[in-house]
Image (cartoon, rainbow, N blue to C red):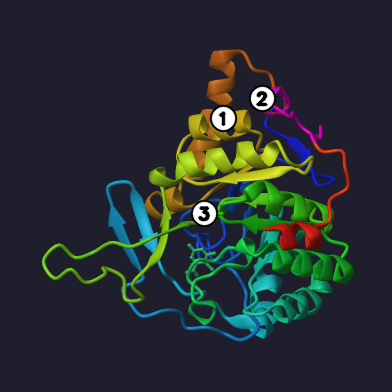
Amino acid sequence: MRLETEVLGVRFQNPFFLAAGTCGFGLELAEVLDLEVLGGFVTKSVTLEPRLGNARPRVAEFGGGMLNSIGLANPGLEKTKREKLPWIRDNVCRPRVLVSVAGHTVTEFFMLVEGLDSEDGFLGFEINLSCPNDARRGGKPFALDPSAVAEIISGCRMRTQRPLVAKLAPNDSDLPRTVRVATEQGADALTLVNTLPGVLLNVSTGDPELGAGDGGISGPALRPSGLRAVREARANTHLPLFGVGGILTAADAVEYAHAGASLVQMGTASFAWPRAAEQAIEGLMGWGRKHQIGAWDDLVSKSPGGNGSSSRSEPFDPIESAEEG
Ligand code: RRO
């Protein structure tokens, strides 16, 4: 099966990315995984100032996957420019890189995009609108507020010509509206989904397992939620979609293609098995042979809504829509 695909006007050698927060800025994983096999990766979310992160422990495992509250630990804008992006520019050849940015305020998103736009080494931005662990926002992601989504995406759009990918939340009670807002305001693609809010309690004490209390669920338990969100988004936008949530194997990626994703991101699986993406890429070629599918693109174009066909025609007013809600 041919895995190359063209999305966002560029060619990807295969549809597999590593998700934000699971591969640092690349170099953190380069010793255990040959990054060059990937279609791409998304960096850890960058904030304006460096952040140490939330109280430990920050991760806990359970039968369905993992709960995290890392709390946006990252080196901040200046160090990302000075050290992280030059490493990517000098060491990453074939994979395409998206830099994830996370503001605590709308204006911070603009400052991050402006601050990074003139740097080398990356393709575009993943705008993280859906972090469930930002204590400064009381855990309420921007993605659940359509007028904030409109403001952030339109403002970022004015500040860069690079691809803008909006990362949305799985617990959005009106995802079609959010998808349409992001589309109308100039996003080039959407990522679905971030982690789902949850908590794990110590059975003896009743205390939360994570230092911060609540966290975000990822891993196999998230896959049905991610698939549902991709299908729902597919019905409401013509934009290419990144599917993420519980992808471990080639078959999981195929499931996301059926739902309407053009590209996929692996997250928690690569924490447990750093070479999971490499194996899934090989597995995908085998899957194609077995099922006589010639190309990844054929799978994507057979999904409901297909690749590039929009089910929307009427113009959409995000402000009016936000007021209706
Ligand atoms: O750093 C985190 O705690 C974190 C982020 Br920014 C995110 O977007 N999703 C997540 O599960 N954790």
**What residue is rendered at 71% in x and 54% in y?**
93
- In primary-sequence order, the first of circles 2 and 1 is 1
**Residue at mark 3 to residue at mark 1: CA–CA distance:** 23 Å
Image location of residue 174, percent across then percent down: 62, 51
The residue under label 3 is 171
For residue 254, the mark is 1
Residue 104 image-quadrant placement: bottom right
**SS label for mark 1:** helix
**SS label for mark 2:** helix
Tell whether label 1 touches label 2 (CB within 8 Å). yes
Is label 1's Cβ within 8 Å of ligand 1? no
- Relative to residue 285, is residue 141 depicted above or below? below
**SS label for mark 3:** loop
Closer to the camera in the image, 30 or 225? 225
Q: Extreme front residue here? A: 324
Q: Amino acid at mark 3?
A: Asn
The residue under label 2 is 299
- In primary-sequence order, the first of circles 3 and 1 is 3
Closer to the camera in the image, 164 or 309? 309
Left or right: 263, with 218 as reference point: right
The magenta span reads 298-311
- Relative to residue 3, is residue 266 depicted above or below? below
Q: Amino acid at mark 1?
A: Val
Tell whether label 1 touches label 3 (CB within 8 Å). no
| Quadrant location of the C terminus in the rendered image | bottom right
